[in-house]
Structures are given as structure tokens and as C-alpha cells.
Amino acid sequence: MTIYLAGFSHLIPFAAGHELIRQRRQHLTLCRATPDLVYDQMIAAGVANRVVFSYAGNPGVGLLPAFRRAVETGQIAIDEYTHFEMVARLEAGAAGLPFWPLRSPATDLASYHAHHTVVCPYTGEEISTVPALVPDVTVVHVQAADEQGNLYVEGLVGEMREAALAARIVLATAEKIYPAGSFRSARSSLLLPGFRVSAVAAVPFGAHPSYAAGLYERDSAFYQAWTAIARDAEYCQRWLEEWIYGTENHQEYLAKLGQQKLDMLQMGEPHE
């Protein structure tokens, strides 16, 4: 299956990614405009055999060691696009179109993946295209949902909406689920209406170690530590065994983190 874990800078669905690891899923195509630690962890766990992306890195820190190691050893294949091309692919998927027209690419990335042009029927101009991206499942994490499945987000949205609308199935995790009708006056925060969402679960701190704007901060200390963890393949597997396979669910993962760490993230205090 083709899976898209959405979220831009914040609201990255780490809890969902960890659950895919716990269930020992394999042979997935992982798509994301900005793969960061969550995909590095999933790749290290052997979840993926292909990654479709437009940037990969540990934000503000460096590279993704497990991702790089998997590419260099042939464990996974990659399809790399620009950010705009990735969004265009999702726009095509959301619109039910087979491709999306673009001006000629300004980079040489087009030479590394399937690239086709069409002739504009109005001007005769040759136009570059990118194929539609239609994930089998898109997973999003949001600050709030209601009992009807309506999803609400404050802060950066990135390509979350496009990734959801392009998908066949949308699964959501939410910091909290509220009674139906709780957000009727907050239409500007609506990410997706409930009729487009297949399932939603309440998962507090479901974005850790990334952040949820207005609720808790990024665990920057973990982002800094991840490079050393992932650089050594054996060390990385030990981390997965302790923190993912060794916890039955996200609640146990949070308990292992400790309430003091969670409280500090909620208060925005420095944490080590």
C-alpha cells in the first residue's frame, strides 16, 4: 500500500508511525513532502521498500542516517520531487485528474523519475507534467476533532489537506475529541469535514517528538540525539526494541517518557 503520513513541522503523526512499526508492517510505499525522524524510524524498522518525497532531513540538525543507509544499500527505492511537484501530484489526486501541468522544471530532479510533457491545446506550448499521487491511506494528526470526525488544526497546515483529499482512506489521530458541534464557530480551523474521514482516535501527545502548536513544544533534545542513535544500525535497532516494540501502545510510550518530560514540553521549558 501507499501511505502518506502528513503534517508540516508540527502535528507529525509519530504515534501512528510507531504503531505501523509495532504491527511489523512491510513493503509499504511511504510518501511525504518532508520525511523526517518518523520515516527514518520506519525505514530502520523495515516498514518501507520505497519512499516518495521532496526533502529528507532532521530539521535543523542534519541528515537521516537510517534513510541514507537504506538507499545506499539498496534496501529502499526513492522517487524525489521538488516541494511544488509533490503538492501538484496531490492536487491532481484530489481533483481526480491523471496528472498536473507545470512549467518546465527548474531542477534536474525530473531526470531521476518518470517525466512527461503534453502540448497545451490552447497555445501549443509544451508543458511538463507530474502524475497524480493517490495514497491508499493518509494519516493526519490534529489538535482537535469532534465526534462526527470533523478535524481542526491551528497553525501550519502545509500539504495536510491536499494529502488527505487525494487519499482513498483518511485516518486521524487527535489530541482530544470533543462533542459534536463544539467548533461550529471555528470554521477557519476546519482541516477536513467528518464525511471525508474514515476513523479518528484520541491520542494525546500523538505528535511527539514533534509538536502541536499551542499545546506542547518540540522535543528538540530528542531531535538532536537521533543522529547518534540512527547512525549506528545496531544502536538504532536497540532503540526500536526498547521504545517501540517494547511498548504495547502509545500510552506505554508516554509513560516511559515520564510525566516530568511531558509537563516541561507543555510549559515550553528547556528539556534535556
Image (spheres, rainbow, N blue to C red):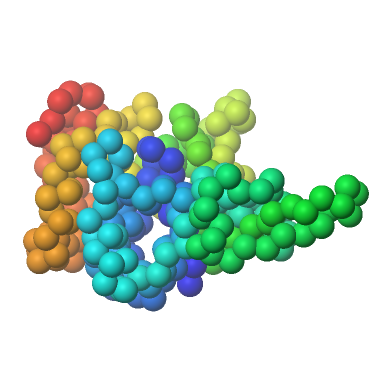
Q: Is residue 257 in sight in this rendering?
A: yes
**Going by the image, does 47 lie left or right of 154?**
left
Name which quarter of the figure residue 75 lies in.
Answer: bottom left
On screen, residue 156 above or below 39: above
* Closer to the camera in the image, 205 or 54: 54
- At horizontal 58% and vertical 36% (from top left) the residue drawn is 190
**Going by the image, does 32 lie left or right of 246?**
right
How many numbered markers are drawn? 0
* Closer to the camera in the image, 69 or 186: 69
- At horizontal 16% and vertical 37% (from top left) the residue drawn is 221
- At horizontal 13% and vertical 53% (from top left) the residue drawn is 229
On screen, residue 29 above or below 10: below
Name which quarter of the figure residue 167 lies in.
Answer: bottom right
Q: Residue furthest right?
A: 122
In the rendering, at what x and y percent does residue 40 appear? 28, 57
Name which quarter of the figure residue 197 lies in.
Answer: bottom right
In the rendering, at what x and y percent does residue 9 appear? 38, 38
In the rendering, at what x and y percent does residue 214 appear? 36, 26
On screen, residue 238 above or below 34: below
Q: Quadrant of the C terminus?
A: top left
Q: Is residue 18 in sight in this rendering?
A: no
- At horizontal 56% and vertical 57% (from top left) the residue drawn is 110
**Going by the image, does 226 lie left or right of 169?**
left
**Going by the image, does 187 lie left or right of 174?**
right
On screen, residue 267 above or below 171: above
